[in-house]
Image (spheres, rainbow, N blue to C red):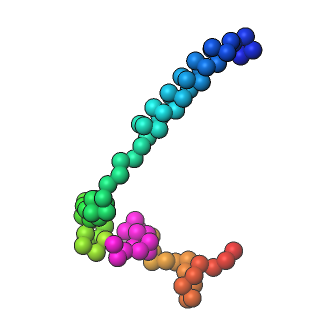
Amino acid sequence: MLMSLKLRDYRLLLAAGSLLAAAIVALCAVPHGSPEQAKTYYQNLAKTLEFSDSSKIFDTTLDDVTSYVGYPDSPAKTSSGFLPMC
């Protein structure tokens, strides 16, 4: 099939493919906000999820996240504070 296409057809396919690619990029683009909007978003999210005091959300750690979802406090850590090597 591709062997029977003429140059004009290849150009048309290339144009259609480029248009499709541009449309996908435009639809998937993530809007950019300000640092203040990001802080407000995460503070509201912390309040909604009842994860942390919204004013202290930026002081939380991954250990806080694991505790929030019900895992015990860092069971894999050794006394040195690092994960053991396997």
Seen in the image, is 25 located left or right of residue 85?
left
Identify which residue, 16 or 78, lies in the foreground: 16
Please identify the residue farthest to the right as the structure is shown.
3
Q: Where the N terminus falls, by quadrant? A: top right
The picture places residue 46, in percent across and down from the top left corner, at 29, 64
Question: In the figure, residue 60 lies in which quadrant?
Answer: bottom left
User: Which percent across, then down, holds residue 44?
Assistant: 25, 61
Quadrant of image for the C terminus: bottom right
Q: Position of residue 34 (x, y in %)?
A: 30, 59
**55 falls in the magenta region:** no
Question: How many discs mark residues in the rendered view?
Answer: 0
**Residue at the outermost bottom position:** 79
Query: Left or right of 30: which side holds 74?
Result: right
Front residue of this view, candidates 11 and 41: 11
Seen at 32% across and 54% down, the residue is 33
Q: Residue at x 35, y 48 (%)?
A: 31
Q: Which residues are magenta?
A: 58-70
The kind of secondary structure the magenta stretch mainly shows is helix
Q: Is residue 29 visible?
A: yes
Where's residue 81, x and y in %? 54, 85
Relative horizontal placement of residue 4, taking residue 46 as reference (left or right): right
In the image, residue 34 sits, relative to residue 64, either above or below, namely above
Is 75 or 12 nearer to us in this picture?
12
| Residue 42 in view (yes/no) | no
Residue at the image point whose x is 54% and y is 22% from the top: 16
Picture quadrant of residue 28 = top left
Q: Is residue 34 above or below residue 73?
A: above
Query: Which of these two is toward me, 25 or 11?
Result: 11
Residue at 71% of width from left, 16% of height from top? 2
Q: Is 59 included in the stretch rendered in magenta?
A: yes
